[in-house]
Amino acid sequence: MDHTAKKLGKLQFVMGFLKGSMGLFLTSILFSMFNTALNTMTPQVIKVAVDSVLDHKPFALPDFVIRLLHLDELRAGHTVTWLLWLFAGAILLIALLAGICSYLSRTALAKGSENFVKEMRDKLFSHIQRLPFCWHVRHQTGEIIQRCTSDVNVVRNFVANQLMEVFRTVFLLVISLVIMFHMDVGISLIVLTFVPVVAAYSGIFYSRIARKFRDADVAEGILSSTVQENLTGVRVVRAFGRERFEIDRFDEKNNRFADLWIKLGNLLSIYWGTGDFITGLQILIVVVVGTIQTVQGNITLGEFLAFVSYVSTLVWPLRELGRILSEMSKAGVSIERIAYILNASEEQDSPGALTPPMNGDIHFEHINFTYEGQNPVLRDIDFTIPAGSTFAILGGTGSGKSTLMHLLDRLYDLPPECGRITVGGVDIAKMKRDWVRQNIGLVLQEPFLFSKTIVDNIRVFRPQASLSEVRNAAQIACVDDAVQEFSEGYDTVVGERGVTLSGGQKQRVAIARMLMQKAPIMVFDDSLSAVDSETDSQIRRALRESLGSSTVILISHRITTLMQANKILVLDNGKIAQMGTHDELVNQEGIYRSIYDIQLSSDDRSLLDEKEEK
Ligand SMILES: Nc1ncnc2c1ncn2[C@@H]1O[C@H](COP(=O)(O)OP(=O)(O)OP(=O)(O)O)[C@@H](O)[C@H]1O
């Protein structure tokens, strides 16, 4: 029952996307039926031609056709050659009409299937945009890309080619059998007995092939993820001389993928080989029985030839049915894989979600947080960031600093009973997610830049911003000079298609981008780690002067980055270890003091002096 439900689900899934192009698909089916009906006429013309031209029998056509076309009179007054031309003309006319129908059917189908696949791609892409961040963290990018590209293509091929073939084959089978039964029941029964045989063996293979396709698809996903990971981490691969290791890793996955396709190929070869034998057997029996029947005078020579013609015409579509079934299994697997993405729940705001002002105090109230299946990452975290202040968070790696910011930005939601985060007294869980994110500017340690020009990257949040606004943000982020030095300045394309920026330049472009957002809360999550201490200090000075009333949260390992903050929180293993100003913390025993002592010996003294100047 489960299986049927699943199948029904797949059909409904496809129908959902077909809805918009139903008119085109119905047009295509209609013309395909005309085409099939016309094609089944040809053996009839052959039959009448052979019987009347070679055997000089009267036309074996319904009386009204003979009367309508005055065939008897024509026949009486004309030569055999003339009759032959008459039948040739009939075949030509049928071929012409069949060709026109085929053209109309295929153009409608091409349009319909492209609309279908476009709608599916649009839906997938917009759905993926709305999936929660945690969903993206849990799934490999290569695998998602594979589902959005090759799986979508498999479904498109199925809808554009195979689905129509199913209709065509069934229609062809029905018309041909009706005509054959009309000519001779005995031979028709022989032909008919082969239909379930072909269907049964196709069905058996269908289920086995489906399993193999599923394995091959999973292997393909793993292979694309390996390639994607390798290309993304190409610098690490080169730096650590891991090329050999990576090649071996790829080989292993590639071998597995190739093995699965070889096994699939073997299975398909058995299928086609067996199919060839069965159809050969079918033709053999029809030829033997047909010849006997003709010799005994039970059927005419023309009818015999028509039978052979129908059987030969039916052989291929029936054989194709097997291929269609295997394609269907492949498409079924792809549909399941696409549906897996589409069935994932999108981020959704509760009805009446709020959009309050975001310039109030930020209060983390007794936060406890655990990532799925992990140990607790944050334990009873409770503190307040006063509005308009600069607040710093210091802590060892893995102490939970970024997690706190993910929770503030609602990239992860706090489960009930695990505390709450309020801004200006309003729980962020009750706010619209978009609103929260628009009002919290976030710069990450490893910022991502799009493959576009620098100016477009900086004004990604405000595409209408003028160049002077962009430059102003870039000056505060201390990246304007560096950009001016590029031959194309702000029009320099960065990323895969263009110039490679240094880690520090990228971080500064990302800071400029965030400044354009003009958010009342700004978070710098270790986002100055790749710039030297001097530039770090310059940026902070420029930021201090330009941020106005925004609340700033600074996360860093570097004491010099944090020391001017109004308050510093020290996190240790998911718990609050210390909190206070630089002066308070440096004068107490504790983590802050030890880090200060270690960094003091290596940091530039002048940067520490900066604090005294302030
Ligand atoms: N998406 C995630 N899924 C599961 N565990 C995670 C996830 N993100 C972080 N963690 C784990 O949570 C803990 C805290 O990570 P977090 O990134 O918040 O630390 P951090 O203090 O920002 O570290 P760093 O300074 O190194 O960036 C770590 O043990 C980390 O492995």
Image: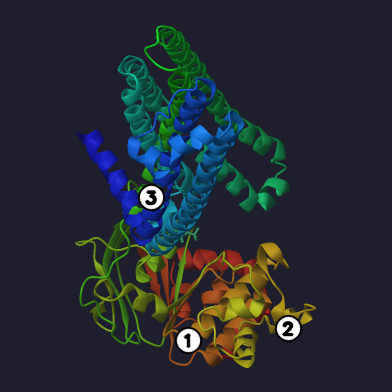
Q: Nearer the viewer, residue 210 or 546?
A: 210
Q: Residue at x 34, y 84 (%)?
A: 358
Give, as a three-letter code, the residue at label 1: Lys
Upstream in the sequence, badge 2 or badge 3? 3
Q: Residue at x 49, y 26 (%)?
A: 52
Q: Which residue is mark 1?
A: 518
Where, quadrant-wise, is the C terminus in this rendering? Answer: bottom right
Give the image location of residue 376, x and y in percent.
Answer: 32, 52
Q: Secondary structure at mark 1?
A: loop
Q: Which residue is mark 2?
A: 481
Residue placed farthest to the right in the image? Answer: 487
Q: Which mark is drawn over residue 30?
A: 3
Give the image location of residue 297, x and y in percent.
Answer: 40, 10
Q: Quick one: label 2, few (<14), some, or many (20+) residues within 10 Å?
A: few
Find residue 348 and report its image quarter.
bottom left
Give, as a three-letter code, the residue at label 3: Leu
The answer to whether mark 3 and mark 1 are in CB contact below 8 A is no
Q: Nearer the viewer, residue 320 or 611?
A: 320
